[in-house]
Amino acid sequence: MRLRLIQRIIFAGLFLLWVALFVAQVVQGHRYREQSEKNRTRLVHLPAARGAILDRNGVPLAEDRISFELAALPQELTNPQQTWEHLHAILGIPPEEFARRYRKGFQARFSPVSLIESLPPETAFQLEEERAQLPGILVRPIPHRTYPLGAAVGSVAGYLGLIAPEELTRLRTYGYTFRDRVGKDGLEQVYNSFLRGRDGGLHVEVNAQGRLVQQLGYLRPERGRRIKVSIDSRLQEVCHRLLEGGQGAVVVMEIASGEILCLDSSPSVDPNAFVDPDRQAEVRSLLHDPDRPMFNRVTRAMVPPGSTFKAAVAYEALRSGKISPQTTFECRGRYELGGSVFKCWAAEGHSFQTVVDALQHSCNVFFYNTGRRLGVDGIAQLARAFRLDQSTGIDLPRESKGLVPDREWMKKVMHHDWQEGDTLSFVIGQSALQVTPLQMLMLFTAIAKDGEVPHPHLLLGIEEPPQEQTASAQGQWSMTDPRERGVQIPLDRAALSVVREGLERVVSTDTGTGRLAQVPGIRVAAKTGTVQVPVGLPHAWICGYAPAEAPKIGFVVFLEHGGKGGLHAARVAGQLLVYLREMGYI
Amino acid sequence: MLNRRQVHGIDRPFLLTTLILLGVGLVALYSASFQKAQMMAVSFLQRQLFYAGLGCGLSLVLVAIDYHRWLEWAYLLYAVNLVLLVLVLAMGTVRGGAQRWLSFGGMTIQPSEFAKVSTILALSRFLGARPPATAGRWGPILGATLIVLLPAVLILRQPNLGTASVFITIGLSALVVWGIPLKFLGILLVAGATLAPVIWGRLEDYQRSRLMVFMNPNLDPLGAGYTVIQSRIAMGSGQLWGKGWLSGTQNQLNFLPERHTDFIFSVIGEEWGILGTTFCLFLFALLFYRGFLIASQTRDPFGRLLIVGLVTMLAVHTLVNVGMVLGLMPVVGLPLPFMSYGGSWLMTCLVAVGIILSVGIRRPVF
């Protein structure tokens, strides 16, 4: 009967629906249950503040400040175009730019998209007041890395950057995520694992509009640990100012402890640029800048030491008895060897010079003679004894090791035998010998302190984890004791005292090459150096320590293309020493 | 009025099933709407109860009066309803892109819902008076087709694709039971299939996108596909036992749009699990079964055609609605009988029940 047909069709339909219900609710039910859970709960990321980097007096070199982030919540953004126009009226940024940032940052409907990372507080408050006209726009406080000294602290602090994909695969197990910023250079990189906080989160139940219904769980973000470093921010600013406009490096260390008081490489970068999305173009240009502002010249530049190396040569010649303090050589401004002529920097010559005179005047001819007595093996050996082939182990990333040439190196790398003429340029620090400013600082420290070389370092202490501190005992620090890591180079005291006398006369006498480093009331010992370069003015060096009678600080000033004879470098050192005296370091 | 025999002859399982469905619907409606009700200071439950009462009263009147009286009035009712449908197009209230409502001093009605019943009445009268054996064949078939297509086209223009297709199904079902030769049925179906592309071309964009998204909800997970995806999640996550009354997260946290109207079944699915949904499907099956039983027992061709039309209407709504909630059918906006919120539709369902019962108590007793 026809009625049955209709009935059967309807019942078949009902049965098929029931089967579909069974599949959806029983067979696949657990999957839908999971989805409904995901639907209703959200993890809200709560970024932790990064630990501050404090200088030796507690002045912040880097710290997280609260900044106001402007974000858009997609699911409440009813009319984006209108909202961008409104924001344009308040902030002056073109609507298309907002639209671009929004498109770029969009992840999910419930996930806020950051539009501006740091708003001035007044603007933040203004936006908060106009919230009713700006649906889907929120202003939320987030920690924002700030470097109060700006570029002056760039060489020391380093900078932050988004974690690189390959780093992320390595660090994922430590809880890093793709949006984490990590230290990419300087202290930020070396002490990243301490400075970094542990991000927290809020587990919330939300409704379909993404509005919070109730809180299910909360993980408090934990601020990263603060570190204290040996830098004196006042001094750091001074040396940054002294280097401004040129290329070079300055480093000052407390000799007894190895604490670095200031360290600057010029030009340097303003680390604030790396955490400001508005300055990305600037960051990109820094990477391609021919002056290499990202390159820390104090620890990484490999340059010939020039005449500053003569201090080490003089010591070795005296120690080994190749010369005595009374030995004299006559300088007529030139030295002939196998038909070639090697000049002294003073064309008229220095006439008869003892080792002390030769250091004072930086006489090349004296050292040509001395170098020939020492031979290439002797000079290479002395360079290694003063650790010019080893990195110093300072707590900054990617330190260079230096290069000490010898016969073997000449053969392997330059493919010819060592010539006697090579020895002559080696002995005045002009050859393939390459050192970093920091290595020279350690060499002069060894001379100043009878071979007692501390471990150069920046870190003074690390704050105990904040969560383990009681309220009454805030700011407990675990201090490092770097003295354990210092080394003792066995040096001959008698030979050293002769060299030290020469170094003191470099500055104290009116014919000394470093006389511009004179500071009234302080005895300064130093050696200048000039490095001839193929193009442009020669590099200028001065390395030394003060006070000469009881050395407290060692210093190095290195100026790329700084001019002949180390005059300008000596002037910079002199100004620096004035400040050091004012601040009580000498 | 009714005599004792007739009162005893009322189909109790049919009546009881209707009341249980109504009760389950109200319980689910409370869960689906109490939050929105608080927010809007309007009790959906109270309104639905009011219409349920009104519908039951109307239904009683229908049971009491011989349905042949209504058949006499059928063409007039049909004509009035057509006028109302034209009025809807001319001056109806627009909600959600569609013009479906007529306002009468504070009350809004949906003539397309009542048109289902009046069309069934007119169709039954027309076909019942022309037995297939005696009358010429093309005449009644074309007449019936016209009766169905007139309101269907008007409703399609609202636009309301779902309701329009209900009319087509009712017409086909009535013709089959009337005794249309299979050859003619085939011709009608082929003609319909030829017209389908034309209709597709005349559909509104939102209707097309709904049909497309029905094929693949992930085409547009935040737009047209959102409802289907969320509804499937709600249904599936109910699992065996459900999350409990008032505890469905999809429902209570507002992930289900339209949940007190077209998607009430996914609230049942989420909060009562497969137990609840199976129970509901069982009740519907029982309802239809009793309906067909009454139809097969009556000797009156008018009565039989009436019941077939009305049961088909209820069944199409049930199948399409549950299928839609499960993501097996396009989201065409057909409410679930007795459960979905909405006065016009609830009253239409109860009127249908009244007419079916009215036929039932007047069938010959064996």
Image (tube, coloured by chain):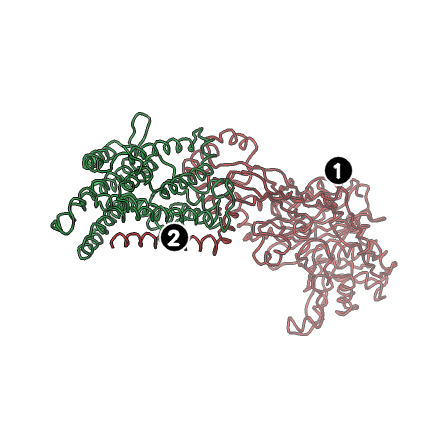
Chain colours: A red, B green
- The picture quadrant where one finds residue A300 is bottom right
Q: Kindly report the distance in space between the C-alpha atoms of the residues bearing marks 2 and 1.
A: 64 Å
Q: Nearer the viewer, mark 2 or mark 1?
A: 2
x, y percent for residue A170: 61, 59
Would you say residue A196 is visible in this rendering?
yes
Say which chain tag 1 marks.
Answer: A
Determine the residue positioned at 37% across, 44% down.
B13
- The picture quadrant where one finds residue A340 is bottom right
Query: In this rendering, would B9 be left or right of A354?
Result: left
The kind of residue tagged 2 is Leu
**Does dot 1 land on a helix, a strand or a loop?**
helix
Q: Quadrant of the C terminus of chain A?
A: top right
Query: In this rendering, would A125 be left or right of A550?
Result: left
Q: Answer few, some or many: residues within 10 Å of disc 2's Cα (few below 14, many 20 plus, some between 14 and 19).
A: many
Residue, disc 1: A471
Find out whether the residues at labels 2 and 1 contact each other: C-beta distance under 8 Å: no
Say which chain tag 2 marks.
Answer: A
**Does dot 2 land on a helix, a strand or a loop?**
helix
Of residues A68 and B307, the one nearer the viewer is: B307
